[in-house]
Image: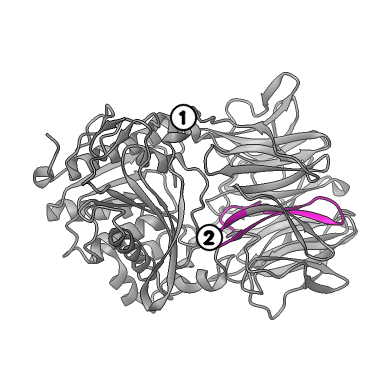
Amino acid sequence: MKTAPYGTWHSPISADLVSSAGVGIGSPLVDGNTLYWVESRPKEGGRMVVVTSNEDGIQVLTPDGFNVRTRVHEYGGGAYTVSRDVIYFSNFADQRLYEQPVGHAPKALTPAEDIRFADCDVDHGNKRLLCVREDHRRDGEAVNAIVAVSMDGNDEGAILVSGADFYAYPRLSADGKRLAWISWDHPNMPWDHVSLWIGDIDGDGTVGNAIRINEGIDESVLDLQWSDDGTLYFAADRTGWWNLHRYASDKVTAVLQMEAEFGGPLWNLGQRNYTLVNDKQAAVVYHTTTGAKLALLNLDDGSLTDLDARADYHQLTVMDGDVVAVRAPTNDTTALVKIPTSAGSFQLIRQPGRLPVDPRFLSQPRSIEFPTAQGKTARAYYYPPANADFAATTDELPPLLVKIHGGPTGYSSAALQLGIQFWTSRGFAVVDVNYGGSTGYGREYRNRLRGKWGIVDLEDTVNAVKYLVANKKADPDRIAIRGGSAGGYTTLAALAFSDVFSAGANYYGVSDLEALAKDTHKFESRYLDSLVGPYPADKHIYEERAPINHLDGFDTPLIVFQGTEDRVVPPNQSEMIVDALRAKKVPVAYLPFEGEQHGFRQAKNIIRSLEAELYFYGQVFGFTPADDIAPVDIENAGGLKAAD
């Protein structure tokens, strides 16, 4: 084993490997005896394709020129469904719905107009698709509704349910006689307060006798699924945690009550955190403060039988009586697996980004709790440096990279992230902070951020650093912070309002809260009402918490990455902070990426951003990375302590 300074270690986890492992897999669906799923293709510009397998191996069903991705809510999700050997999907380029019998070319069902579709359910009895539609054809805010799209084609969709600001989970009962859905209105987000509805499908196909079955209850509801006997199941957090409930005989009852999350925030449509195996059992994923577990839930007595506690699971479905799901462990890349409900280990179906790395190069996450403001406790995952070939000198503490997740109502799990291992294998320690407001710890923890964005997240982030420094886990003079989107805002706030950081990397983050309140997409246009305060009534709070307005103490070198076609956080947010630091003579680098939206999907841009960030830290902290990296243009770089 060689001895070398932290940051200079050679690693087999290259930026190219990170991008290729970014071949995402998700949304498994079963039609008859056939399993389908979706994969992303970073080396094809981030294209999403529907895939299946047969005796000849993996078969890509989506032809060239098509991209299975919807822009409803901008974050998408629920972009395809399949029934009776026919795939129905939204195409990213034109947002039209297409019908594609397996083995044939796609045919458009909706006109080429500025309307988007997602989260569809098939209604064979009426030869139509029941979908969430987002209509952008008029000036002003888009109009959302649940519509019926005829399978005969050239149909913009007949409105079935309208009047609310947002809709999700239109789900048809097994007998085709009832429709369930959720709706919510500004300024709520779907994890704040939603309405749960059931209506009758009348003889003419319209929806009548709609009743709200959670009237008078302040709760978040998601993941609607009908059983064959007409019982509606759903996750609701009326207990303070997303627990599984049922609606039958005009009454809602809890299947179980437990301090665990059987669901997650509805950023992407079509999420499935459980699946009904039969009339007695459901396969569920539940999260506690100690991690995630896959289990069987007895629907009669609420008892749980754990199947796997070694990984996080997503998008559950059932095939031949067994569970199919996306499995995300701590020590391997994400895979599609089948898990027997009787006994035995999982069967690998597909692992598109296999890990060609010795496990000794992987850093294992350590769940930590640490004290924070007002006597509370916050949580994070800590990753120490790990490399089978290198060790540091005994008197050196590692540089610390603080990772801030987006949302901010998101969360970071312990599942393997090669984007973290890229850093730990080069000699960085990483702390992935689940600050107050994060999902996974109940509604009370999630609500800590109400009215406190820019305060609670910042306090928890700074206190995570102080905790690790006090425990000799990090070099206090080499602390970097990185985050994207809402995590980018916390990154910028940390650099503007605290002095514990030596460098920062902002990925399409928010620098001006007021500008964001005025210029963002419909889904999040009132999100800041709960995170900051109603605008413009609380304009002064927006100004107080905006990093762009507090540059006096912002002297920390910053690198900024931005997609030029980002509608969630527009490029002007990055350009404002770059221009301000440029004028202030603070070291700053700016890398815009043409054609990228909110989050980078193209392999070349994933590679460039990671390598550029590493190069930047080398210039700031005074070390030379082992990687051969194209230089980054850092303005005002005269004061940096570059490596010899």
Kind of residue at disc 1: Val
Kind of residue at disc 2: Phe
Residues under labels 2 and 1: Cα distance? Answer: 40 Å
Q: Secondary structure at mark 1?
A: loop
Q: Is residue 159 visible?
A: no
- Image coordinates for residue 5, horizontal then vertical, percent: 23, 38
Q: Which residue is mark 2?
A: 523
The image shows residue 89, relative to residue 280, as above or below, that is above
Given residues 113 and 371, the one toward you in this image is 371
Q: Is residue 74 left or right of residue 477?
A: right
On the rendered image, what quadrant is the N terminus found in?
Answer: top left
Given residues 582 and 475, the one toward you in this image is 475
**Mark 2 vs mark 1: in front:** 1
Q: Is residue 278 magenta?
A: yes
The image shows residue 636, relative to residue 581, as above or below, that is above
Given residues 639 and 172, the one toward you in this image is 639
* Image: magenta residue range: 265-292
- Image coordinates for residue 567, horizontal then vertical, percent: 44, 51
Q: Which residue is mark 1?
A: 357
Q: Is residue 17 left or right of residue 243?
A: left
The image shows residue 624, relative to residue 416, as above or below, that is above
Which callout, 2 or 1, points at the residue further toward the start of the chain? Answer: 1
On the rendered image, what quadrant is the C terminus found in?
Answer: top left
Q: Residue at x 72, y 45 (%)?
A: 155
